């Protein structure tokens, strides 16, 4: 069954600290993996996209890693800011077809001052 | 540049009433269009997708329907809403071809059926 599991479900950190969010997937055939940031009550916005051959991709203070062998990905946030408070969603695209995306339930991050 | 508009932002409807949510895309042609629903604490669930005018595919059986009367217009409808239809509805678009195509989302509609 094609699934994307994320952990932790929620996370609270202090401003300036780092954190790492995890994503495990069983989607097959695999095409690429994306991380989205979703502010409360808004649509998701893309942070990174990685294909099978890409191990690491950075976008500012966000760094995503991908291990296609173990089917795991992580999103590392450095020097967190209050504006990082949001849900972070791991999304895996199946190969072929019409852009079939499988969404994780997300990790809700709260950054406190 | 491309933009996607979705409205209304919030909606409170009584059980049994009809529903019409509209989504339009600007700045692109022949996009793939999608309707998703997001329940609290759950991942986005694909409801419908469309690869062209009048072409609608449903992912899950439900009380909702979708239509694409124009190339860049996608409408989500229901004749009679159920309590279980409450949720956060998102419209999205992507270009037609390519594995790395980005999916761009609208701002969402919070629907509460009372």
Image (cartoon, rainbow, N blue to C red):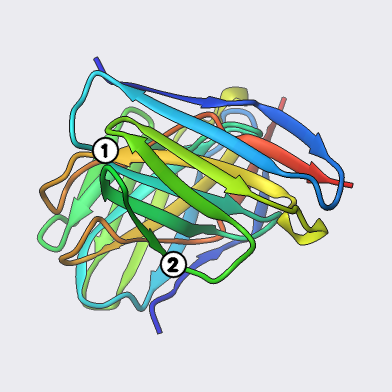
Which residue is outermost to the bottom? Answer: A1
Q: Quadrant of the N terminus of chain B?
A: top left
Within the image, what quadrant is residue A10 found in? bottom right
Residue drawn 71% across the image and 54% down it: B40
Q: In screen coordinates, is B22 left or right of A100?
A: right
Q: Secondary structure at mark 2?
A: loop
Q: Position of residue A99 (x, y in %)?
A: 25, 55
Residue drawn 72% across the image and 25% down it: A113
Out of B107 and A46, give the one closest to the viewer.
B107
- Chain designation of label 1: A
Q: Is residue A110 visible?
A: no
Q: Secondary structure at mark 1?
A: strand
Q: Position of residue B107 (x, y in %)?
A: 53, 29
**Residue where numbered disc 1 is placed:** A58
Which residue is outermost to the top? Answer: B1
In the picture, the disc for residue B59 is 2
Give the alpha-carbon distance from disc 1 to disc 2, as whole Å: 33 Å
Q: Position of residue A80 (x, y in %)?
A: 53, 31
Q: In screen coordinates, is B68 left or right of B107?
A: left
Residue drawn 78% across the image and 58% down it: B82
Q: Position of residue B23 (x, y in %)?
A: 46, 31
- Chain designation of label 2: B
Residue drawn 14% across the image and 55% down it: A54
Out of A100 and A76, give the one closest to the viewer.
A100
Give the tally of numbered discs.
2
Q: Do the residues indicated by labels 1 and 2 lie within the same chain of the protein?
A: no
């Amino acid at each position: 069954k094609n699934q994307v599991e994320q952990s932790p479900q929620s996370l609270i950190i202090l401003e300036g600290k780092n954190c790492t969010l995890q994503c495990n997937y069983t989607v097959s055939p695999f095409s690429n993996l994306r991380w989205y940031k979703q502010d409360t009550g808004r649509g998701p916005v893309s942070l990174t996209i990685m294909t099978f051959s890409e191990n690491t991709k950075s976008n500012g203070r966000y760094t995503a890693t991908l291990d296609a062998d173990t089917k795991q990905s992580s999103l590392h946030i450095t020097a967190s800011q209050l504006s990082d408070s949001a849900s972070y969603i791991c999304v895996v695209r199946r190969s072929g077809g019409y852009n079939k995306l499988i969404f994780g339930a997300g990790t809700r991050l709260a950054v406190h001052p | 540049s491309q933009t996607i508009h979705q409205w209304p932002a919030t909606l409170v409807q009584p059980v049994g009433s009809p529903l019409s949510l509209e989504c339009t895309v600007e700045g692109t042609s022949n996009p793939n269009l999608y309707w998703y629903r997001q329940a609290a604490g759950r991942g986005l669930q694909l409801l419908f997708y469309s690869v062209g005018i009048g072409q609608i595919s449903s992912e899950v059986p439900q009380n909702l329907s979708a239509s694409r009367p124009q190339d860049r217009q996608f409408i989500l409808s229901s004749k009679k809403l159920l309590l279980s239809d409450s949720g956060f509805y998102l419209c999205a678009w992507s270009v037609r071809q390519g594995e790395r195509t980005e999916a761009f989302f609208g701002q969402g509609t919070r629907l509460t059926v009372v």
